[in-house]
Amino acid sequence: MNRAGKAQGAVAKAKSRRVVLVIVAVVVLAPLLVVLTRWPTGSAALPTGDCGFEIVKTFPHDPQAFTQGLIFHDGFLYETTGQHGHSRLRKVVLETGKVVQEHRLDNDLFGEGMTLFGDRIYHLTWRSGTGFVYDAKTFKEVQRFRYSGEGWGLTNDNKRLYMSNGTSRLIFLDPKTLQSTGSVIVMYRDPVTGRDTPLHALNELEYVGGEILANVWRRDVIARIDPESGRVRGWIDLTALKSKGGITSGEVLNGIAYDKNNDRLFVTGKWWPKLFQIKLVPKG
């Protein structure tokens, strides 16, 4: 072959290599680009979840409520709200959104999550390191307790309390002494790297069927967490909830409540005008 032929062959091979590299790059990077587009604010990409949802019913929700904690008990919603000067513990009629009982925190306190254990309501505050225990019927304060760091979410399994503080750690609290009895780091398998990764910004918590359901701050997903190991068992993808539910105002998704007697799951968000009963739909 002459020099011109060799040169043309080399050029053709080079072009072929470039085409192959481009194809490989697209195949390898496309999933990563999709994930990074879906979760733009995180240091590691979260999977979209293995459960979707259907809206079963829509209820009114106070658009002035900066929802921090949410539970369902004896036919009523119990909700704690945040913001200085606007932090409340409230008993709410589900069907109408009407507040029928309320306890106000001092203006210097920023209310956070809560849980009902026995006949007591346990309530956290954000950065004051102070928690409150109330009589569940009267909302009368019966005790205060201290903890280090921030308070975010709170739930229980009828044995111990589980507390989140905005990190990847779940802290175990003795409901009698309100002292920490241990903790676990919540981990998930990163879909891009394949590595076990701490799940940061755990927020509102709800114990359901042996799992802890956790809002993740600024994520439209709920993590399903094994409370013993901290392993994320799966995800509930609520990325379409705002659009399907007609939510055009308000802040982030936050607030999970479970009606055990009727197997109903409720979700809402901070300053959302609606609260939704949803049905989980397996993905696959």
Image (cartoon, grey):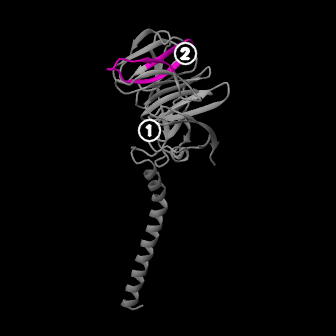
User: From this viewpoint, is residue 127 visible?
Assistant: yes
Indicate the quadrant containing the N terminus: top left, top right, bottom left or bottom right.
bottom left
User: From this viewpoint, is residue 211 visible?
Assistant: no
* Residue 234 falls inside the magenta stretch: no
* Residue 102 falls inside the magenta stretch: yes
Query: What amino acid is found at the position of numbered circle 1 in the picture?
Result: Val
Residue 185, compared with residue 52, is above or below; it is: above
Q: Which residue is mark 1?
A: 252
Q: In the figure, residue 171 lies in which quadrant?
A: top left
Q: Position of residue 119 (x, y in %)?
A: 56, 11
Numbered badge on residue 130:
none
Q: Which residues are magenta?
A: 100-123
Q: Position of residue 22 (x, y in %)?
A: 44, 68
Q: Earlier in the sequence, mark 1 or mark 2?
A: 2
Residue 29, compared with residue 142, is above or below; it is: below
Residue at (45%, 72%) from the top-left corner? 19
Q: Judging from the image, what secondary structure is the residue with disc 2 in?
A: strand
**Furthest-right residue in this view:** 262
118 sits to left or right of 218 = right
Cα distance in 3D space between marks 1 and 2 = 27 Å
Query: What amino acid is found at the position of numbered circle 2 in the picture?
Result: Phe
Q: Which residue is mark 2?
A: 117
Residue at (42%, 77%) from the top-left corner? 15
Residue at (42%, 24%) from the top-left corner? 112
Label 2, residues with CA under 10 Å away: few <14, some 14-19, many ≥20: some
Across the whole image, how many numbered discs are drawn on residues?
2
Q: Position of residue 105 (x, y in %)?
A: 39, 18
Q: Position of residue 80 (x, y in %)?
A: 46, 24
Q: Are marks 1 and 2 in contact (CB under 8 Å)?
A: no
90 sits to left or right of 8 = right
Q: Judging from the image, what secondary structure is the residue with disc 1 in?
A: loop
Q: Main secondary structure of the magenta part?
A: strand
